[in-house]
Amino acid sequence: MAVSTEFEHIRRTARTLRVATTAAIVLLADQLSKVWAVEVLSDRTVDLVWTLRLHLTRNTGFAFSAGAGLGPLLALLVPVIVVVLWRYRLRVHGRIAPLALGLLLGGALGNLVDRLVRGRAWGRGGVVDFVDLGFWPVFNVADAAIVVGVAVLTLHLYRNGGTPRDA
């Protein structure tokens, strides 16, 4: 194996590990926070500061509670999106883009787990949301990771002329 080919293999492996580790951390944080929210917030709301409060809701739709009842469709669509994002990991470079991609993957998987296991039937579960800013739809750790991941990846692509490579 040529040195450049071996070096590229090492870089791809490191990139894959960055994406996978970030996704796993997000997934774990999301699911642990949802277990906590279901146990602690099922019968109360916790007011924190200003308009921030913790308030348990379930979202059977997609972003911002739109499309209520589309859970089964999303349960089929999200795995396709996850596979596409996972394959995309080989095209992103640098330190930031793989982390952003990991945020997206971890968030998508976190909400997918809810759809699959937190319902009475396959794909009919509601995503647990509990962070309420008062002026924004109620969200969770996975949602926040997705929003940050999209924002960072968009800025990264914009900065690099629409290509996933670092300048």
Image: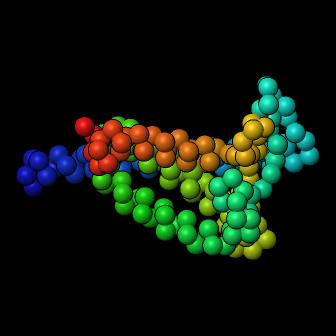
* Quadrant in the picture for the N terminus: bottom left
Q: Residue at horizontal 22%, vertical 51%?
A: 9
Q: Which residue is more in the foreground, 48 or 162?
A: 162
Q: Which residue is more in the foreground, 144 or 160?
A: 160
The x and y percentages for residue 24 are 52, 48
The colouring scheme, among rainbow, by chain, secondary structure or one colour, is rainbow
Specify whether 130 is left or right of 76: right
Answer whether residue 40 is visible to the viewer in this image.
yes
* Quadrant in the picture for the C terminus: top left
Q: Which residue is more in the foreground, 66 or 7?
A: 66
The x and y percentages for residue 49 are 79, 25
Q: Residue furthest top?
A: 49
Q: Residue furthest right?
A: 43
Answer whether residue 23 is visible to the viewer in this image.
no
Q: Quadrant of residue 71?
A: bottom right
Q: Residue at horizontal 75%, vertical 74%?
A: 121
Above/below status of 76 relative to 136: below
Q: Residue furthest left?
A: 2
Q: Residue at horizontal 79%, vertical 26%?
A: 50
The x and y percentages for residue 67 are 70, 65
The x and y percentages for residue 48 are 80, 28
Numbered disc total:
0
Above/below status of 105 relative to 26: below
Q: Quadrant of residue 111?
A: bottom right
Q: Residue at horizontal 32%, vertical 48%?
A: 162
Specify whether 135 is left or right of 81: right
Specify whether 28 is left or right of 91: right
Specify whether 47 is left or right of 85: right
